[in-house]
Amino acid sequence: MTLDDIAVGDERTVSEVRQGDYGDGLVARLQALGVAPGKRISVLRRGWFNGPIVARVGQTEIAMRRGEADLVVVISGIAGAADAANSP
């Protein structure tokens, strides 16, 4: 599942950011903005007619093209939940 697949208001955990046709530049830029494995991300808005997606990571809001959002792989689990469940 990718960021482009989730509904407005849903929150997920980033699993990976793929390079796609953009190369390392996009991956580095998104990580600098906080979109990195283990971080929680939510979709705030979707533009009309396949317009950009506005997402929030922490306190940062990011607008990105649908093609870029399709490279952000997300999972439904909560970051650190497995660690918390296994701790004494």
Image: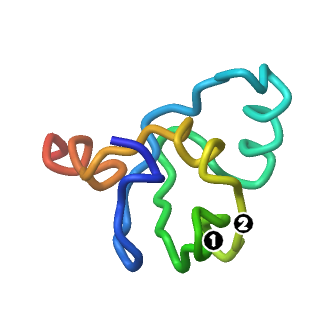
Furthest residue to the front?
49
Question: As rendered, which of 22 and 83 lies closer to the eye?
Answer: 22
The residue at which mark 2 appears reads as: 62
Task: Estimate the x, y position of residue 54 in percent, counting from the top left.
Answer: 63, 71
| 71 lies left or right of 73 | right
Quadrant of the image containing the N terminus: top left
The residue at which mark 1 appears reads as: 54
Which residue shows up at 79% across the image and 22% down it?
24
Task: Estimate the x, y position of residue 48 in percent, counting from the top left.
Answer: 59, 76
The quadrant in which residue 50 appears is: bottom right
Count residues near mark 2 (Cα–Cα under 10 Å), then give few for <14, some for 14-19, many for 20+.
some
Task: Estimate the x, y position of residue 17 in percent, counting from the top left.
Answer: 58, 33
Which residue shows up at 55% across the image and 74% down it?
46
Q: Is residue 79 above or below residue 15?
A: below
The residue type indicated by label 1 comes to Val
Q: Are marks 2 and 1 in contact (CB under 8 Å)?
A: yes
The residue type indicated by label 2 comes to Ile
Q: Is residue 46 above or below residue 86?
A: below
Which residue shows up at 40% across the image and 51% down it?
13
State the SS at label 1: strand
Which residue shows up at 19% across the image and 44% down it?
87
Q: Is residue 59 above or below residue 41?
A: below
Q: How many marks?
A: 2
